[in-house]
């Protein structure tokens, strides 16, 4: 335990996800030792992020303005929507550059244990977009875990009456990986999803 | 498979101990409370990274110490494994095999195979169905360590689905909570996987357990029948599961919990034509419990082509002298067996002896 402001800083930092007490302490001492200018920039960035970051009114990804960069881009195909759980998933897919369409950020996955139900996700907004924009295909890119699968299943069932094509990301082996290091569940799924050559 | 030597530091009541073990039968002898079970526990932990007695690692670290250390060498038919485990009172344990670290428990478990029988196993025979489900899960994980995720995956799906049903505020006639279909599908996928694994594991144990029990009980001593009583059965199983969920849907919405699935499985144990749970004597029940574990070891030997290490904690308690003798007689052909006995007089002939007293071991 330290005294005063340094301990307050450690306490605040250790509340962040993925930061334990030891990391928090290291970060806090780094900030205290760093030039005053660096610390000020960090604090301003924190405040600005909290004040200015908004969510796109269309797809609910983090955005600087009303609508995000992707939804504003006329070059993106509005008839394909890729559904993800969080903005960070969108960023990951965007980095791959494989989706020519737009996104829809649900804001999480259905998890009754954490008290997250369908009403807490932006599902109705997705249905509205599909109706309104003449969407042809919805790609469900929720995480390939229990909660992500259940969410995909739920969304797919709601989309079925609209007749839109609904697809789900495949699960399988990582590219550039070794078979011997793949875990058995992944290997099993990869085998199930094998393709004719 | 053979544990060749073991070193333990600050483990339970052991400050520092080293034992060498032979390939056959070893008896760990000593009075009550001297550390026989702790020594067997250390050996089993080294091979499986779980304690057969406690689910948390905290009690394993000697009071006053921060870290317990187990080291040992296991010889299998193909290789030698130097296993080193640091058990911390709080925080992540460290495990190394042949000096390189092991990320997942199953990476060690599929190389070092062991079966542990303890007096607590009596609960498999006499306790709630949950104890028998745990045994079935232990049995398939022992056989196929790669499948150790099956039971936790099902458990988590079940908890999610139950919470959904419990928190639902709608009326029974209105069709159920939104999102239930998604959890139905997950429950079926994970439930089918678990049911099939249990069925296969019981199939491999069933006849072996019957003959182990007979060998133990002797002529006229009765029989042990083992049968998997699955909550869902049918072919294909997934369709049967879906149909069963469908038919219990209304009930589930009223009772607000999942009524179909392997969390309602049981393992039928019948001794002398009567259900073991209600009718077996203490000796019979213990005989059945030992027979199940010996059968598991037999199934494992068949699966991997060599005998697993077998740990028997106080196997003679509750057995009459004739049964003791029959059990001891069969232990010579089971590969490496390490057993504990409270009395030197009970040491089977031909066994090596480790004398345990107050946390130290005398090799004789």
Image (tube, coloured by chain):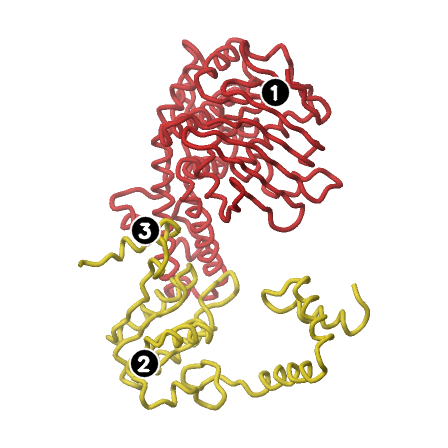
Chain colours: A yellow, B red
Chain ID for label 3?
A
Q: Position of residue A91 (x, y in %)?
A: 43, 76
Image quarter of the C terminus of chain A: bottom left
What residue is at 41 percent from the left and 49 percent from the top? B259
Q: Residue furthest left?
A: A197
| Residue at disc 2, secondary structure | strand
Q: Residues within 10 Å of mark 2 (few under 14, many from 20)?
A: some
Q: CA distance from mark 2 to mark 3?
A: 31 Å
Q: Is residue A26 above or below residue B146?
A: below
Q: CB of mark 1 within 8 Å of CB of mark 3?
A: no
C-alpha separation, residue under disc 1 versus residue under disc 3: 44 Å
Work out whether disc 1 and disc 3 sit on a shared chain: no
Q: Chain of mark 1?
A: B
Left/right placement of residue B13 relative to residue A136 reads: right
The disc label shown at residue B28, or none: 1
**Residue sitting nearer the eye, B170 or B305:** B305
Q: Position of residue B64 (x, y in %)?
A: 76, 41
Q: Which mark is residue A93?
A: none
Q: Is residue B122 left or right of residue A157?
A: right
Q: CA distance from mark 2 to mark 1?
A: 69 Å
Q: In the displayed structure, would residue B121 be above or below residue B155?
A: above
Residue for badge 3: A188
Give the residue drawn at x 59%, y 35%. B71
Q: Secondary structure at mark 3?
A: helix
Q: Are marks 2 and 1 on the same chain?
A: no
Q: In the image, B70: left or right of B102?
A: right
**Residue denoted by label 2:** A101
Q: Quadrant of the N terminus of chain A?
A: bottom right
The correct choice, above or below, for A195 with respect to A60 in the image is: above
């Amino acid at each position: 335990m330290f005294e005063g402001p340094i301990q307050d800083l450690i306490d605040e930092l250790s509340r962040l996800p993925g930061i334990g007490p030891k990391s928090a302490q290291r970060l806090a001492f780094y900030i205290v030792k760093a030039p005053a200018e660096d610390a000020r920039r960090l604090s301003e960035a924190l405040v600005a992020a909290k004040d200015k970051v908004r969510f796109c009114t269309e797809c609910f990804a983090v955005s600087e303005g009303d609508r995000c960069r992707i939804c504003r881009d006329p070059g993106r195909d509005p008839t394909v929507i890729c559904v993800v759980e969080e903005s960070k998933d969108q960023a990951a897919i965007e980095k791959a550059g494989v989706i020519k369409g737009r996104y829809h950020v649900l804001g999480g996955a259905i998890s009754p244990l954490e008290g997250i139900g369908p009403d807490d996700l932006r599902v109705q907004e997705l249905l509205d977009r599909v109706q309104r924009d003449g969407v042809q295909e919805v790609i469900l890119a929720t995480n390939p875990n229990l909660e992500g699968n259940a969410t995909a299943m739920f969304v797919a069932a709601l989309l079925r009456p609209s007749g839109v094509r609904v697809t789900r990301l495949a699960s399988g082996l990582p590219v550039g990986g070794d078979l011997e290091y793949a875990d058995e569940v992944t290997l099993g799924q990869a085998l199930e999803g094998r393709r004719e050559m | 498979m053979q544990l060749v030597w073991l070193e333990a530091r600050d483990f339970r009541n052991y400050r520092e101990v080293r034992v060498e073990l032979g390939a056959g039968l070893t008896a760990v002898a000593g009075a009550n409370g001297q550390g026989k079970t702790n020594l067997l526990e250390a050996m089993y932990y080294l091979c499986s990274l779980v304690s057969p007695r406690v689910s948390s690692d905290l009690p394993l670290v000697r009071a006053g110490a921060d870290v317990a250390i187990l080291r040992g060498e296991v010889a299998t038919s193909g290789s030698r494994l130097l296993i080193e485990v640091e058990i911390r009172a709080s925080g992540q344990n460290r495990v190394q095999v042949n000096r390189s670290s092991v990320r997942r428990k199953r990476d060690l478990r599929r190389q070092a195979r062991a079966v542990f029988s303890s007096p607590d196993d009596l609960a498999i025979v006499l306790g709630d169905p949950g104890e028998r489900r745990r045994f079935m899960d232990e049995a398939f994980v022992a056989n196929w360590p790669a499948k150790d995720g099956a039971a936790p995956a099902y458990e988590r799906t079940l908890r999610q689905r139950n919470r959904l049903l419990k928190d639902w505020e709608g009326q029974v006639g209105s069709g159920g909570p939104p999102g239930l279909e998604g959890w139905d599908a997950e429950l079926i996928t994970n439930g089918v996987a678990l049911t099939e694994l249990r069925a296969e594991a019981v199939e491999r144990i069933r006849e072996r357990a019957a003959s182990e029990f007979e060998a133990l009980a002797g002529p006229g001593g009765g029989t042990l029948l083992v049968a998997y009583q699955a909550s869902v059965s049918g072919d294909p199983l997934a369709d049967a599961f879906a149909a069963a969920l469908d038919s219990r849907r209304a009930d589930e919405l009223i009772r607000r919990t999942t009524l179909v699935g392997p969390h309602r499985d049981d393992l039928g144990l019948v001794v002398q034509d009567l259900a073991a749970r209600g009718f077996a004597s203490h000796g019979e029940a213990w005989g059945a419990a030992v027979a199940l574990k010996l059968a598991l070891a037999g199934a494992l030997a068949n699966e991997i082509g060599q005998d697993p290490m077998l740990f028997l904690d106080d196997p003679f308690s509750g057995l009459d002298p004739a049964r003791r003798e029959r059990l001891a007689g069969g232990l010579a052909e089971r590969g490496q067996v390490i057993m504990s006995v409270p009395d030197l007089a009970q040491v089977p002939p031909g066994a090596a002896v480790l004398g345990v007293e107050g946390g130290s071991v005398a090799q004789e």
